[in-house]
Image (cartoon, rainbow, N blue to C red):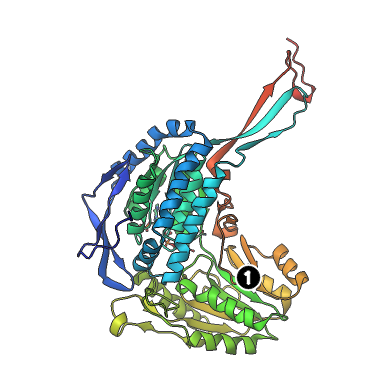
Amino acid sequence: MSTTLIQPTETGIAVKNLINGQWIPGDRTFESVNPANRTHVVGTVPLTPRDQVDAAVAAARAAFVPWRQKSWVQRAEYVDNLAQLIKRDLEALSRLVTIECGKPYNEGKADVVEALHMAQFMAGAGRQHTGYVVSSEIPAKDAYIWRKPKGVVGVITPWNFPFAIPLWGVLPAVVAGNTVVFKPSEETPVLGHKLAELIQEAGFPAGVLNVVHGMGEETGDALVKNKDVNVVMFTGSRAVGSLIKREAVAGEVHKFVATELGGKNAVLVLDDANLDIAVNAAVLSAFKTSGQRCVSSNRLIVDRKLEPQFTERFLEKVRRITVGDGLDPKVFMGPLVNQEGVTKWHFHNEKAIEEGGEVLHHGKELTEGALAHGNFVEPFVYRFEQYKPGTFCLREEAFSPHTCIIGVDGLEEAVRVYNDTDYGLAMAVITEDYRKWRYVRENADFGLGYVNLPSIGAEVHLPFGGVKGSGNGHPAAEGAIDYLTHRVAFTVNHAEEILLAQGLSADL
Ligand code: NAP
């Protein structure tokens, strides 16, 4: 059996909430549309009010103790079931990613494959260590550092990796013994619903994994403010992440918020760079997913010695970029996710011109023929011969196909320019010199670093997260178990008498 695919109805798939193992339809709904053709309704989706979010959290709380009492291996078995279902439905899910969020099919597939890898990784984590033994000052004592689940985890995710990112949070949470309430992005609720269907089919007990749909301001807000949520795992923009961090934690000493936010990433092309690698890495970093990755590079920081050749070859490739519906295999850039994305792209381009950027390729919004009902734009490329500190366009995330070539003199200036933003997520350095990449590794602010690669291309068994304004240093994927569990100290005495550390007397 395979999960249902797009139904040819006017209202698309009827999305429901999954609360305590029951499918709950919405009294109020909204539509999710295809960004390549806004007249195509992909699904009709509940707008979940606060009391229903509270019911989902209560269901997760009730399921917590029995779920915690299972072993890590038992819990991981359910994740293994889920991995097999994702593998079974890989093609259909990949197509749905393209239809609901616009990414070209190959990228949609990579998203689902990343989700599959996370499921495989976490299924294996059930048999990894769940704590460790450390030595004690007292020979007859065994001291353990033990991982215990925290309770109910609220997972709030962005639209741009609609299948992979939810599983970065949900799976480590449940394998570690927590229960979950997940709110998908309002742009990709049908994918959230497909995930909920697979969760049901995988046999997770009722209440362990709950899914509620709706707008961030209402449904998401209710989730982060619910006092019975122990951990909020948030991935999204810096603005919303900061708001959540202020509101979710306010007065709640027990509550933890992990934030994975945006970036103003860069490719650093040093004076000894292999130009073929540099140009390809720059195109992939700036324009894959139409620049809508948290790790997309809005800045190409290029040593002046190579800048003329680099720019000429980069622009040659940019002019050949194909824009269109991601289901067409010839397309490199799909649509932006919504009309606000198009407005934001125009805004960043205009700011770049206003702030003195020299426009090298003025991409247009495409509104004719087959593209008339989609959110299609072409790449926008500009240049600053000298770095201009304090400019909006060189410091703020554009999250669209908008990038700047910045000329610099040498390694140290390249790193100084790179660091001059409030973000610190991803960077790539193109060089043949191990001393230079080591200097960059030691001096640049980043969570994800690449040498002779684009600034994109993460894998689930590595930590994923940024520094400075890109997050609070609690990486997702590999790193998530750390904040989804309490590391408790547990000490056992094997002697017939009480002996205390630090020479403390136990005499009564
Ligand atoms: P977003 O607008 O910040 O939304 C992210 C999630 O937060 C959505 O589910 C959203 O719901 C919800 N939300 C919005 N307001 C909320 C509130 N007041 N309370 C609770 N939840 C709320 O981000 P986006 O546009 O979906 O994604 C793009 C951003 O995510 C970019 O900045 C990108 O760099 C970043 N990102 C970061 C990473 C990372 O790992 N560092 C990965 C991917 C993307 P609605 O959809 O209903 O608004």
Q: Nearer the viewer, residue 129 or 434?
A: 129
- Residue 470 in sight from this viewpoint: yes
Q: Secondary structure at mark 1?
A: strand
Residue 8 location, x and y as percent?
Answer: 22, 65
Left or right: 412, with 242 as reference point = right
Left or right: 230, with 267 as reference point = left
Q: Is residue 137 above or below residue 203?
A: above
Q: Residue at 67% x, 26% y: name it.
A: 491
Residue where numbered disc 1 is placed: 428
Under mark 1, the amino acid is Ala
Q: Is residue 241 above or below residue 40?
A: above
Q: Quadrant of residue 460?
A: bottom right
Dot 1 surroundings within 10 Å: few (below 14), some, or many (20 or more)? Answer: many
Q: Residue at 48% x, 65% y: name it.
A: 110
Q: Residue at 77% x, 20% y: name it.
A: 504
Q: Quadrant of residue 365?
A: bottom left
Residue 45 location, x and y as percent?
Answer: 27, 56
Q: Quadrant of ligand 1?
A: bottom left
- Residue 248 in sight from this viewpoint: no
Residue 255 location, x and y as percent?
Answer: 49, 40
Residue 500 location, x and y as percent?
Answer: 74, 21
